[in-house]
Image (spheres, helix red, strand yellow):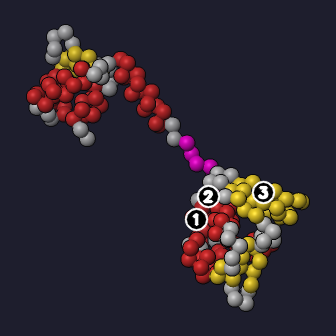
Amino acid sequence: MSSINEVLQLLVDGEWHTLTEVSKALKISFEELDSIIHFLSKYGFIEVGDDLIKVKIDKGFEELITEEFTQETEVKKPKPPMLMTIKGEFQTIECTETEMVVTGANLEIDSMRKEKEVKEAETKTDVINVNDVLNTLRFLVDNEWHRYDEITSKLQFTTEKLLKLIQVLRENDLVVVHDKFGMLRLRQEVKIKQ
């Protein structure tokens, strides 16, 4: 951390501090401290006392730091992933990073939020979640035949997980499967916009 940041951190309490106190606390020489104080006061980050031996952070700069700090500490929790089952006659599926829009006839979409960690659930039961479905559909978007081992390799699925995923995709009539050769492709009637 630079000495300028260290000085500002020490002065962030808004109180007056003597140069001796700052020098001892930060273990920097008076010469180095003098150049830092000169720089900070020149650009309005700190105030220097009339006696030139004490300093404090400028009120305007203190408010700015405090405001930025409180904004940074508000960490938004990510939404837990969703498990879902889709049934019906599909026309299109539009996917983004945060949203999936499915259009078609007689659609039934059941979803529930996962409360536990995704990785725990996957290791215990190989749960199929919406991201797995979306990633597989994006991979199959070219409507070409793909071998099971190619899919497991590219999408980093276990064989068991891929088989469960194929079952879900097959039940929802999204893919055509060639069991004899271990291949599948997207059903041509299904259009996916990315």
Instruction: Look at the numbered disc 1 and give the secondary structure of its residue.
Output: helix
Q: Are marks 2 and 1 in contact (CB under 8 Å)?
A: yes
Give percent across and percent down for residue 166.
72, 75
> Which stretch appears magenta?
76-83
* Callout 2 crowding tier (Cα within 10 Å): few <14, some 14–19, many ≥20: few
For residue 57, side relative to residue 164 (left or right): left
Residue 36: assigned label: none
Q: Nearer the viewer, mark 1 or mark 3?
A: 3
At x 39%, y 27%, the residue is: 65
Vertical side of 11 occupied by 177: above or below: below
Task: Tell me, yes or no, whether the highlighted magenta stretch contains residue 78.
Answer: yes
User: Circle 3 sits on which residue?
Assistant: 102
Distance CA(mark 3)–CA(mark 2): 26 Å
Task: Tell me, yes or no, whether the highlighted magenta stretch contains residue 117.
Answer: no
Q: Is residue 112 visible?
A: no
For marks 1 and 3 on the same chain, the one whose residue lies earlier in the sequence = 3
User: Circle 1 sits on which residue?
Assistant: 120
Give percent across and percent down for residue 27.
15, 35
